[in-house]
Image (cartoon, rainbow, N blue to C red):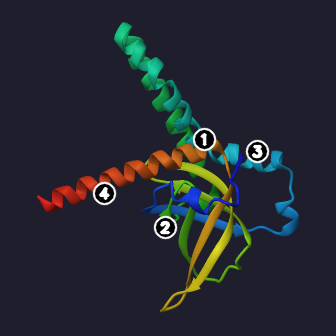
Amino acid sequence: MTEISPNSANERRRYFRVEDEIVLAYRPMASDEVQESEDARRRLADTFSLTANLDYLSQQSKTQLHRIQRSNPDVADYLETLEKKIDLVARALVMSHSEFVDQPTCHVNLSATGIAFDAREALKEGETLELKLVVPPSLAGIVVYGKVVYCQEKGGGGFRVGVDFTGIQESDQEFLIRHVVKRQMAELREQKQNAD
């Protein structure tokens, strides 16, 4: 799991942010949990982040698949079918987590290094959270750890909470970068079509 350095205010500006709809579950972590071994945290992330990890591996193997397509299209088609099967199994495993069954999406501001979302209850600045994200349309599951950087009361009730990620797997961060870029490109296309 990648630890993100605390002096990342300038670093974070390198990452784009988008408004998005995802399934989100979070929980504050007790101080003794925060001290838990990195191995235990990594096991949880590896189990839940299966689809993001598979997406990361698929991106890495694209070059080889293109070479196979040129020399043997039938084998390439078969490999793509296998990849789709594996993806379906991974999605089913992510959605089998009881807390995500039939849970609606929520509106967030998302980047590869942090997230902002609405909460019913106040969270303390500096508090460590475990966050589980399911990102449509791929339904990639991601587990990240983060610190609350602000919690502002909203007019009409509730709070807007900003969290900087402090622990994230490299494959999950790569997935979020690609997801955010795709969302931005889709938004730009939509704006262009509306302008025409």
Q: CA distance from mark 1 to mark 2?
A: 21 Å
- Give the class, few, some or many, for how many residues have Cα within 10 Å of label 2's Cα (few <14, many ≥20): many
- Give the class, few, some or many, for how many residues have Cα within 10 Å of label 3's Cα (few <14, many ≥20): few
Q: Are marks 3 and 4 in contact (CB under 8 Å)?
A: no
- Given this view, does label 2 or label 4 mark the residue nearer the observer? 4
Q: Which residue is mark 2?
A: 108
Q: For this view, does 193 lie left or right of residue 134?
A: left
Q: CA distance from mark 2 to mark 4?
A: 16 Å
Tag 4: amino acid: Glu
Where residue 142 sits: x, y (%)? 60, 51
Q: Earlier in the sequence, mark 1 or mark 4?
A: 1
- Snapshot quadrant of residue 160: bottom right
Q: CA distance from mark 2 to mark 3?
A: 26 Å
Tag 1: amino acid: Ser
Q: Earlier in the sequence, mark 1 or mark 2?
A: 2
Q: For this view, does 150 lie left or right of residue 13?
A: right
Tag 3: amino acid: Arg
Residue drawn at point x = 37 percent, y = 12 percent: 74
- For this rendering, which residue is in front, 80 or 118? 118
- Give the class, few, some or many, for how many residues have Cα within 10 Å of label 1's Cα (few <14, many ≥20): many
Tag 2: amino acid: Val
Q: Are marks 3 and 1 in contact (CB under 8 Å)?
A: no
- For this rendering, which residue is in front, 4 or 175? 4
Q: Which residue is mark 1?
A: 171
Q: Earlier in the sequence, mark 3 or mark 4?
A: 3
| Element carrying mark 1 | helix
Q: Which residue is most to the top?
A: 71
Q: Which residue is mark 4?
A: 187
- Given this view, does label 3 or label 1 mark the residue nearer the observer? 1
Residue drawn at point x = 45 percent, y = 21 percent: 63
Observer able to see residue 96: no
